[in-house]
Image (spheres, rainbow, N blue to C red):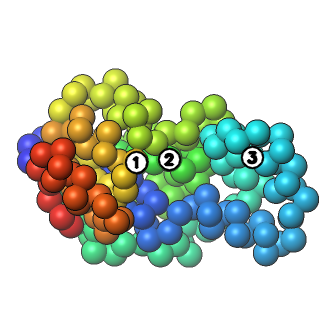
Amino acid sequence: MTSSLPLCVDLDGTLIFDDVSRLAFRCLLKKGNVCKLLRIALSSLGNVARIKHEIAAIADLDPATLRYNEKFLSYVISEKQRGKKLILSTGANHKYARCIADYLGIFDKVFASSESINLIAEKKAKRLVDEFGRHGFIYAGNSMTDIPVWKQAAGCLVVSPLSGVLDTLKKEKLKFKLM
């Protein structure tokens, strides 16, 4: 894999073992905010980006309490120390992505979901291609929604893959490195 290309890192299931949107949702449930969650669901009418945005507006997460994939995080830090540009590229809401990036202090840029865009799959692939060009980046992810991104990347890093991911990568004839 070309060492001068930026490394774009997914958050949920890759850099951390959890999903920040689900953690925030659970946090709101534990605090008894069921009415607020129902209002968000009804007002957003299935718009996932809007739902993530509304939840992020009322729920905070402490990045120090997240379960980081320490082995992969060590790899990412070593890449940063070698001079590689690092981009946190996630479907998580921008509030959480920025908070985690600031906490870790290693990312050069953050691409994340907004109120109107759920930055996953083809939308994430397009954002990265718009920024770095086709085959102009290396991408680290773990799920089926990462397949469109890997198809546009110069290098595929697979971290803690979910069921079916490796078989799909092989079927698509994409070369990858299992982390």
Position of residue 82 measured from the top left corner of the image (x, y, whole percent) = 15, 55
Image quadrant in which you'd find residue 26 = bottom right
Residue identified by numbered label 3: 54
Residue bearing mark 2: 91
Local SS, label 3: helix
Compare marks 2 and 1 and give the one earlier in the sequence: 2
Judging depth in this view, the residue of 22 and 108 nearest the camera is 22
Question: Does 151 sit left or right of 105 as displayed?
Answer: left
Secondary structure under tag 2 reads strand
Residue sitting at x 87%, y 71%: 32
- On the image, the x and y values in percent for residue 92 come to 54, 50
To which quarter of the image does residue 30 belong? bottom right
Circle 2 residues within 10 Å: few <14, some 14–19, many ≥20: many
Task: Give above or below for 116 relative to 50.
Answer: above
The outermost residue toward the left is: 2
Residue 75, relative to residue 41: is it above or below?
A: below
**Which numbered disc, 1 or 3, marks the residue that appears first in the sequence?**
3
Total numbered labels? 3
Residue 145 is marked as 1
Which x, y percent locates residue 68? 42, 72
Q: Position of residue 42 (x, y in %)?
A: 83, 44
Distance of label 2 from label 1 (alpha carbons): 10 Å
Q: At 79% across and 48% down in the image, what residue appears?
A: 41
Residue 46 placement, left or right of 32: left
Give the quadrant of the C terminus: bottom left
> Relative to 27, is 172 on the left or the right?
left
The amino acid beneath tag 1 is Thr
Q: Residue at x 63, y 31 (%)?
A: 116
Is the residue marked by circle 1 packed among few (<14), some (14-19), or many (20+) residues within 10 Å?
some
What's the mark number on residue 42? none
Circle 3: residue type: Glu
Label 2–label 1 contact, CB within 8 A = yes
